[in-house]
Image (tube, rainbow, N blue to C red):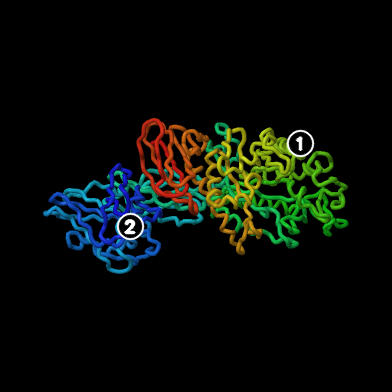
């Protein structure tokens, strides 16, 4: 009997009847996740303050099982709710404390034998201290022998700790328990089995972290009992940080059999997603000189949200006007030697020399990101500032009054048109120096310019070819990208380029309702900087922002977020000291969630196949793996499956890095199968053929 709700069919196909009522009891539902069960909804409905209940049965012996969970927000500690349970007037469970037994939001089942010679079973609930008694469901099975075991084990990772930084070979351990007996625990890393199932307690496996990339990875344990019930632990995220000698992997290149993604030569698809902010390479502030960004703190921030990509920004102007403020930028690639001063009052630039400190910083920051498992987009030029942020005294290096080399770009945007061979020669020398600085590093992709306007097409195409030609003479070759041209640009110009990757800006890519699926013609990093303006994001709200990320992922796109991070921006961003504005955490966390699944599935074999699900958001390798996003709350949907047995996993993306709320297996025939998430809000369903 489902004590607190309507009739319910569980994961084994059994029907739990709706109750006729508890005298004086109250019915409630709390849709918080419940661990240790394949049927959390059965526990989320409950009755509190039941005094007693009498069942009419045939005379005989019975096994009575009572299902509990402590999901009350005021009862998340031992001693909050203590009560006795009686059967036939005899106390069978004294001083029962659900939280003390299994913790909060976890399944507990208590079973006792009841004799019913007169054809009735009376169950009583007697308060001892704290809150009133509660019960979620009752099962009565004829016979004095133990009923069929339908209770899943409980399991949790005990080491390493969540958030721990690890290296080399480590021991992964788990604690598991069951109402009967645990027969095995299977450890997993990012959804892939770690060795064979461990069948003997204490449960442990060794993990050689040098076989994984540096960065955040997720450990889980699956406990199994003799009846075949199983449960998956909460995921524990650890940060792998091995030395450069063990962390290296080949540079990225487009994955030939699925060109929506990059690969590192392993055959696996590499999915890129993450935040980026303006001061990630050059210092940027309203004060002069601008204070440096705490780069290690920034990398910690990226890792806390499970990001594996960021852009290293550049700007062209030492002094500029943006967001109604005068701002300052440093350092620059060239030394300020004079003689004479530039228009900003500082020594003129010598464009025939390089400021080695600038390139040392570039290399150091790329390496630091690599050692955290983070790829970087090295931005070479900036066009937005040249169009919209100029000041009469901005000190722009390519303007004649600001350098000692006779280089004069004319108007600011003319420097990005190939109209002056002298300017182009300085730019080419700078690009060669950048390549020389980071060519041996594998976590690099290049970006020609941020939002240079439509005037820059020929110039950007030139530098795409220039980089490719120069890197052909070097040990490694890296992908080159072209991002949306603002203003006057079109996505067709990006697709027509020879760039391996692009960031479009057409309104379709900022669509919350229906972003276009990637057809494989380019790797597409869909950046809110170009396609989804922050004011529209705020207008749409946090749930829509999370949906935008998941919809992009399921359509073969790779979402990026233009993150204000620690910049105070009225109406947009309100950080507190070194703490970023939490308003943007849902979009930050959603990107980290999609990276979890990009690593869990065989992404190289999966393509957007909208027609396979009624939600229109399905990434699939038909017959093998399906990942489905349901943006609507409490709505059933269909997935067109090939016949077979599938493991399933329900993922709730509503908070933090999300929660796996239910797992199990199903056997189906060919065709549409109906599913309903066991929780409210948007949902993710992962199916894998067994």
Q: Which of pointers 1 and 2 indicates the residue nearer the eye?
A: 2
The answer to which of 29 and 159 lies nearer the viewer is: 29
Marks 1/2: CA distance? 69 Å
Q: Is residue 257 visible?
A: yes
Across the whole image, how many numbered discs are drawn on residues? 2
Residue 105 coordinates in the image, percent (x, y)? 37, 57
The answer to which of 609 and 625 lies nearer the viewer is: 609
585 shown above or below 75: above
Residue 608 coordinates in the image, percent (x, y)? 52, 35
Q: Secondary structure at mark 1?
A: helix
- The residue at 57%/57% (across/down) is 583
Q: According to the image, label 2 marks what residue?
A: 27
The answer to which of 674 and 216 lies nearer the viewer is: 674
Q: According to the image, label 1 marks what residue?
A: 458
Q: Secondary structure at mark 2?
A: strand
Residue 3 coordinates in the image, percent (x, y)? 29, 54
Q: Is residue 79 left or right of residue 519?
A: left
Q: Is residue 414 left or right of residue 295?
A: right
**Extreme bottom residue here?**
129
- Estimate how packed mark 1 is, as few (under 14), some (14 to 19) or many (20 or more) residues with alpha carbons within 10 Å: some
User: In the figure, residue 468 lies in which quadrant?
Assistant: top right
- Estimate how packed mark 2 is, as few (under 14), some (14 to 19) or many (20 or more) residues with alpha carbons within 10 Å: some
- The residue at 85%/45% (across/down) is 410
Q: Is residue 214 visible?
A: no
Residue 613 coordinates in the image, percent (x, y)? 46, 36
- The residue at 74%/56% (across/down) is 329
């Amino acid at each position: 009997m489902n004590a607190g709700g309507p009739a319910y069919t569980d994961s084994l196909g059994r029907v739990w009847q709706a109750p006729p009522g508890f005298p004086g009891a109250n019915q409630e539902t709390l849709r918080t996740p419940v661990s240790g069960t394949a049927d959390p909804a059965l526990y989320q409905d409950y009755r509190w303050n039941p005094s007693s209940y009498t069942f009419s049965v045939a005379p005989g012996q019975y096994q009575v099982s009572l299902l509990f969970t402590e999901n009350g927000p005021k009862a998340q500690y031992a001693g909050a709710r203590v009560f006795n349970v009686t059967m036939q007037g005899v106390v069978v469970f004294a001083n029962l404390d659900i939280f003390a037994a299994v913790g909060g939001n976890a399944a507990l089942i208590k079973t006792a034998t009841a004799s019913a010679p007169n054809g009735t079973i009376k169950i009583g609930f007697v308060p001892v201290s704290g809150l009133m008694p509660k019960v979620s469901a009752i099962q009565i099975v004829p016979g004095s022998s133990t009923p069929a075991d339908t209770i899943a084990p409980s399991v949790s990772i005990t080491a390493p700790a969540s958030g721990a930084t690890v290296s080399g070979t480590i021991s992964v351990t788990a604690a598991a328990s069951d109402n009967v007996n645990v027969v095995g625990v299977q450890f997993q890393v990012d959804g892939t089995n770690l060795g064979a199932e461990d069948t003997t307690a204490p449960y442990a496996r060794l993990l050689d972290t040098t076989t994984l990339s540096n960065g955040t990875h997720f450990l889980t344990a699956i406990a199994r009992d003799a009846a075949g019930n199983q449960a998956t632990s909460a995921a524990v995220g650890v940060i792998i940080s091995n030395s450069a000698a063990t962390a290296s992997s080949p540079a990225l290149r487009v994955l030939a059999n699925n060109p929506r993604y990059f690969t590192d030569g392993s055959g696996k698809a590499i999915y890129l997603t993450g935040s980026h902010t303006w001061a990630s390479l050059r210092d940027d502030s309203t004060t002069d000189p601008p204070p440096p960004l705490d780069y290690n703190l920034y990398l910690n921030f990226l890792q806390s949200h499970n990001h594996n990509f960021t852009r290293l920004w550049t700007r062209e102007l030492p002094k500029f006007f943006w967001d109604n403020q005068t701002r300052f930028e440093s350092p620059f690639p060239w030394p300020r030697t004079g003689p004479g001063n530039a228009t900003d009052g500082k020594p003129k630039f010598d464009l025939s020399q390089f400021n080695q400190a600038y390139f040392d910083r570039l290399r150091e920051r790329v390496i630091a990101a690599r050692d955290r498992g983070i790829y970087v987009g090295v931005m070479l030029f900036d066009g937005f500032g040249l169009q919209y942020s100029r000041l009469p005294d901005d000190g722009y290096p390519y303007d004649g009054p600001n350098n000692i080399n006779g280089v004069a770009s004319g108007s600011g945007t003319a420097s990005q048109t190939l109209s002056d061979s002298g300017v182009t020669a300085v730019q080419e020398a700078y690009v060669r120096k950048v390549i020389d600085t980071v060519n041996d590093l594998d976590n690099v992709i290049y970006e020609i310019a941020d939002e240079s306007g439509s005037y820059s097409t020929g110039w950007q195409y030139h530098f795409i070819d220039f980089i490719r030609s120069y890197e052909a003479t070097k040990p490694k070759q890296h992908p080159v990208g072209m991002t949306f041209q603002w203003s006057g640009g079109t996505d067709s110009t990006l697709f027509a380029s020879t760039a391996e990757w692009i960031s479009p800006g057409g309104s379709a890519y900022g669509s919350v309702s229906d972003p276009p699926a990637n057809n494989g013609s380019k790797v597409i990093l869909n950046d809110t900087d170009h396609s989804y303006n922050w004011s529209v994001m705020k207008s749409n709200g946090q749930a829509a922002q999370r949906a935008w990320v998941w919809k992009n992922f399921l359509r073969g796109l790779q979402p990026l977020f233009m993150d204000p991070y620690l910049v105070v921006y009225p109406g947009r961003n309100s950080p507190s000291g070194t703490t970023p504005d939490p308003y943007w955490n849902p979009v930050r966390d959603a990107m980290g969630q999609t990276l979890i699944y990009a690593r869990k599935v065989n992404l190289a074999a999966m393509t957007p196949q909208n027609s396979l699900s009624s939600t229109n958001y399905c990434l699939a390798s038909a017959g093998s793996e399906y990942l489905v996003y349901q943006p609507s709350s409490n709505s059933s949907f269909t997935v067109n499956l090939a016949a077979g047995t599938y493991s399933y996993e329900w993922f709730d993306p509503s908070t933090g890095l999300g929660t796996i709320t239910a797992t199990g297996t199903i056997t189906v025939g060919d065709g549409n199968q109906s599913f309903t998430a066991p929780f409210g809000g948007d949902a993710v369903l992962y199916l894998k053929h067994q």
